[in-house]
Amino acid sequence: MRTLEELKELVACGKGEIACDWKLANVQLVNVYSREIYPTDIYIKGKRIVSIEPGVHLEAKQVKDCGNLYAIPGMIDSHMHFESTMLSPEALADVVVPKGTTTMMADLMEIANVAGEAGLKEMLKSLERMPCRMLIEVSSRVPTAPGLETTGAVLGAAEVDALLGWKESVSLGEMDSSKILLSREDEYLEKICSALNRGKPANGHAIGRLGQELNIYASSGISDDHECVTEEEMVQRLRVGMKVFIREGSTERNVEGLVRAVVEHGLDTENLMFCTDDKHIGDIRREGHINYNVNKSIALGLDPVEAIRMATIHAAKHFRMEEEIGSITPGRMADIILAKDIRDIQPEEVWFEGKPAAVGGAMLEETKVRVYPDWIKDTVKLKTPVTAGSFAVPAGRHGGGAAAPVRVIRLVKDQIINEEDRAELPVKDGFVLADPSQDVAKLSVVERYGKNGNVGTGFVRGFHLEKGAMAYSMSHDHHNIVTAGVDDGDMAAAVNEVARLRGGLAVVCGGKVLASMELPIGGLMSEEGPREVEERLDGLNRAAASLGCDTPAPFMALSFISLPTVPELGLTDMGLVDVLEHKLIPVVLE
């Protein structure tokens, strides 16, 4: 919110009547409005920019000679779920700010599905402490698949309308297409109306939808989509007036294919922007955050200024915030990256709201993780004991034979989409077994809210597990405990370890826990700092590799493989889901 006093000071500084706080001298300004790069000085008062006019000389209390560094607007992540990083909001800030991200548009559907409105309010307490801006895309899917999963909370139309009134909210969070095309319940259209009537966009989740289905979806008021994998999907969304968030996460690698198509066909970038959606801390440290999307796009042949515009002003305009963020222009927030190279942006300094926040790839001050209340660290409760027998899959009429035909969820490399596969799996004592020789493991989801003790079990191909099991208390979007393994006893041990930790990750082999990490905040996030989480996740990844798993981000893949809104199949505590038809289907074929 702007104040009269703030505006009076900006005007007085520009007229030379009072001193500015800072002068960033000798920069090469990347102007995302005029698409120019030119030498100038930047004057700052408080949180905002006073002037960028070349040749103007204003008084400033502090002067920094930037030595001809490029001055680039702070970057914007258009859609992300911070819980997927396993970090608290405070710890995440210490990782992304040095990479140049100063604003994150966060859909908090993960903590919302676990703890509802109370969980969202708890996260807001953390946002106030962060040296970056986190704004809320109000979760539209709590639960994501009603009637097909058990969650910890429900947010109906009235609750969502109230949340959209919060000053921190910028949009309605991603609405998956089945809510419009299949269920057609008033509740979901009411949520879209609430956003649009408040002048806020309604974020989409249109994976796999093309043609008339996409037209119907867009006609409901959906504003954008971050699930594009192919050029055809991107172009069709642009044709119907939807914006496209080009995503690059840990398991959702879409920049290569989509930006290459933009470059090869000379597509207009005006309605394109970037997001990470879900990215683990190690990948952020090694690759970067939104600056990685920008740098990779430039390497693919996109003009540097256009790539920067996609990461800044395009996103600001889409969220109706261009008067505040997205550019280095007078009156806007002084969120600034100083970098040597316009084609490979590695920030020398990052400024947030008129103050230096990070220098040389590190924060000037560490953001301390606050003490979270006990109630939000007590969300993992097993109603019934989990044993090897919990994961038994009856072979049905194939029980007397040597094998049974089953549906299998097959991982797709570098994507969160999956494909329905088939396999003939061995049968013993009337139950279907996993078969490592065919790269088929069991996949199970265990209800963790203490409500019903449900266990849904199917099969998955693509982890290449030869032994043991993995488990994780983040399984989108219901966030029950998901486990994959080739030994039922090890699966039970992994789930019980996660429950003992009050949420977390575990790798088990031969009944022995090889590695584990607690995630007590909602069963999703750690109370530790980014370095500790990264080191422990690396250890878990090594433990998973010792089981034969060669997936680049095994736990991110595990968290998504059960998602009942990403084609073709999903798995919940209630069973196997046909995603596009939004219904439960049998694992064992007749």
Image (cartoon, helix red, strand yellow):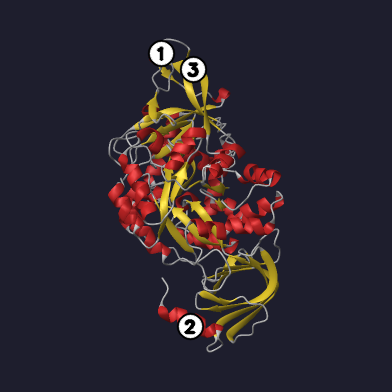
Q: Residues within 10 Å of mark 3 (few under 14, many from 20)?
A: some
Q: Nearer the viewer, mark 1 or mark 2?
A: 2
Could you tell me how far apart the alpha carbons at marks 1 and 2 are, in whole angstroms? Answer: 80 Å
Q: How crowded is mark 2: few (under 14 residues within 10 Å), some or many (20 or more)?
A: some
**What residue is rendered at 42% in x and 54% in y?**
171
Could you tell me how far apart the alpha carbons at marks 1 and 3 are, in whole angstroms? Answer: 10 Å
Residue on which the image places disc 2: 9
Q: In the visual, does 227 lie left or right of 298?
A: left
Say what secondary structure mark 2 lies in.
helix
The quarter of the picture where residue 100 lies is bottom right
Label 2 amino acid? Glu
Q: In the visual, does 44 lie left or right of 395?
A: right
Q: Give coordinates of residue 407: x percent, y percent.
A: 47, 23
The quarter of the picture where residue 252 lies is top right
Residue on which the image places disc 1: 399
Q: Give coordinates of residue 344: x percent, y percent.
A: 69, 58
**What residue is rendered at 48% in x and 39% in y?**
206
Disc 1 to disc 3: CB gap under 8 Å: no
Say what secondary structure mark 1 lies in.
loop
The residue closer to the viewer here, 343 or 120, is: 343
Which quadrant is the N terminus positioned in? Answer: bottom left
The residue closer to the viewer here, 458 or 308, is: 308
The residue closer to the viewer here, 589 or 332, is: 332
Looking at the image, residue 544 lies above or below residue 580: below
Residue on which the image places disc 3: 426
Q: Earlier in the sequence, mark 1 or mark 2?
A: 2
Q: Earlier in the sequence, mark 3 or mark 2?
A: 2
